[in-house]
Image (cartoon, rainbow, N blue to C red):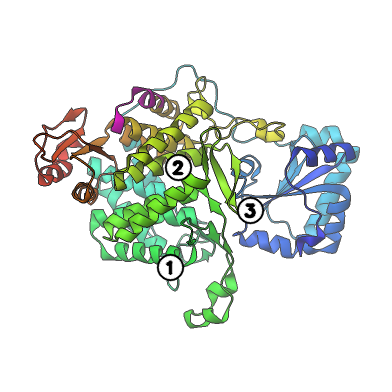
Amino acid sequence: MTELIEWNEWKPETFERARKADKLVLLDLSAVWCHWCHVMDETSYSDKGCAQVINEQFVPVKVWLDQRPDIGERYNLGGYPTTALLTPDGKMVGGGTYIPPRQLAPYLASVNEEWKNNRAELLARAATRVEEPIPFRELPGQLEKSAPEQIANLLKADFDEAHGGFGDQPKFPVPETIQFCLLHYHVAKDRQALAMAEKTLQGITGIFDETAGGFYRYSMNREWSVPHFEKLLELNAELLHCYLDAHLVTQRPDFKAIAERTVAYVDKTLSDPQGFFYGSQDADEAYYHAAPDDRARHKAPFVDRTLYVDANAAMASSYLKAGVLLDRKELVDRGLRCLDFLLAHCFDLKKGACHYVDSLRPQKYGLLMDNAALANALIEGYEYSGNPLYLYKAREALEFLVQNFWNAKRNAFTDALPEKKAIGFLNESLAPIKENLLAATALTRHAAILGETKYKEIAERVLKTFSLTYHEHGLYASLYGLALYKFLNPVVVSFYSAKVDEQALADARACMKVFEPRRCVKYGSEVRHGQRAYLACSNKKCTPMLASLEEVLGELRDDDHR
C-alpha cells in the first residue's frame, strides 16, 4: 500500500518546496507494467519505517516512465524501478533500482546524514550523465556504402548461434536487428544475415504467450525460456512487423501463424472501441504460471488503457502491413482508423504531437519520438489507402519536427523541446539515435515520394552525423543500417490512373507483397488516353512508363535495382 508515501508530481513547485525545506528529492521512476516496481510498492514503500523516513526526510516524487520517457532517459539507473536521490536543483547524488525495505531505510538515512553534515563531499561525488549531449559538429562524417556490411559483422560477432538473438542474459528482443538482417540479405544476398533473422525469430517464440498470444518483454536467460511477463504495445507492434516480413521472405507458415496470433491478442486485449490501442498489459506471475485451463480462475492482469502516440503509430503501421500480407482488409481499415484517431486527438499544428492521451485530453507535447513515429505512420497511411490527406498531414508533422527539433549546429534532432523552468537533467539536450534515424527515414520517404530536396538534405545530415558514432550503439547500429539503405536507394513505385480506385489500390497492394523495405508508393493522375500506367524508379534511374502490373512486379523482383 504505497498510500503510506506522500507522493508528489514532477513539477517546479515540488522542487522549490524541496529547496525551501533543504531536503533531497526521492525520485521513483516506475511503470504500470513493471513487476519489480510493483514489488517495491508492496514491500519497501509499504513498510512503515521506510515510509516515515521518506516522508520526514525527503520530498518523494513518482514519475510514470511511459508518460515521461524524457525523464526516464535522463535519470534511469539501469532498470526499473529506478530509485534516484536528487538535489533540489535536480542533480543526482545517489540511488539504485529495486531496494528492499531492510536496505532502503538505512541507505536513505545515511545519504540524508551526508546531505546535512557532509554536503560538499556528497555533491563532489554527484553523478554525471553517462550519455552527454552529442558534441558540436560543424563538419559531420560521410556516408559510407560499406556501413551495412560493417553493421552485419557487428551483429554476427554478437549472435547467439545456439538460441538466436544477440548477447547473453537477460535476452531482450531487438526488432531492428531482425529488420536489418532481412534487408541486408535482400540487398547483399548475405545468407548468414537471413539465418540470424530466422534463428532469432524462432528463439523469440520462447517469450510468446502460447495461451493468449502476444509477446512478453524479455527473457531472463539466454535460452528465451524464462520470460518476464509484461506485454508492451510497441514491442508487439515491432515484432508483428518482423514476423510478417520474415514470412514474406521465407514463406514459413510458423512465422505467419505467430503474426496472426499476435493480431488476435491485440484485437482482444489491447484494442479500444474508439479506434486506438492500449499501452500495455501487466506482468502477473501467478496468472501466467497457471496452466492454460486454470487461467480463467485468475483475474486477468491489469491493462493500461492509456493511448501512447508513438506506440499507436507503430501498431497502426503494423496493422496496415498485416492487412495486406494476411489478406484481411479489416486490418487495413483498423490501422487507418487508428491514424484518424491520432490526427483528431493527438496532433496540433502549433504543438505537434502529444505523447499520451488521458480521458481524451492530450498530455505532454514536445517529444521527438511521437512526431517522428506519427510522420512515418501517416506516410504509410497514404501508401496503403491512396488518400492524399495522410501525406499532407505527414508533411505537417515533418514541418513541425524540422522547425522545432532540428539543431543545425549539431546536425541532429533534439529529443525534447525545452520546458519552462526545466529541472536538472531536463536542461540537457540529447540526440538519441533511434528517434533521429526514425525522423531521417520519414524525411527520406516523404522526399522520395514528392521530390523534396530540403527534407532529403536534412536526412543526409543526420546520417552523416551518426556515421561517426553508430558503431558505439551496439545492436542499435542496425537502426543506422536500415536508415542508410533506405536513403541511398529508395525504390519509388508510381501508380497512374484517373483516380485512386479499387484497381489502383489492388495494384499497389500487390506490389507490397514483394519484399522491398525501401519501397515508397506514389499515386498520380497523369494518364495517357485514359489508360493506367506504372513507373518504377531506383538507383536514380526510372523505367520507361510501364503498361502492366506484371512489369512492375518484375522490376521489383529484379536484382539490378538492389
Q: Nearer the viewer, mark 1 or mark 3?
A: 1
Q: CA distance from mark 3 to mark 2?
A: 27 Å
Residue matched to label 1 = 213
Numbered mark located on residue 80 in the image: 3
Quick check: marks 3 and 2 in contact, CB under 8 Å?
A: no
Q: Callout 1 environment at 10 Å: few (<14), some (14 to 19), or many (20+)?
A: some
Secondary structure of residue under mark 2: helix
Q: Residue at x 32, y 53 (%)?
A: 321
Residue 248: image quadrant is bottom left
The quadrant the C terminus occupies is top left
Residue matched to label 2 = 374
Q: Amino acid at mark 2?
A: Leu
Say which label, 1 or 2, has the lower sequence index.
1
Q: CA distance from mark 1 to mark 3?
A: 25 Å
Say which label, 1 or 3, has the lower sequence index.
3
Q: Residue at x 35, y 36 (%)?
A: 150
For residue 474, above or below residue 194: above
Asked whether residue 452 is drawn in magenta, I would say yes
Say which label, 3 or 2, has the lower sequence index.
3
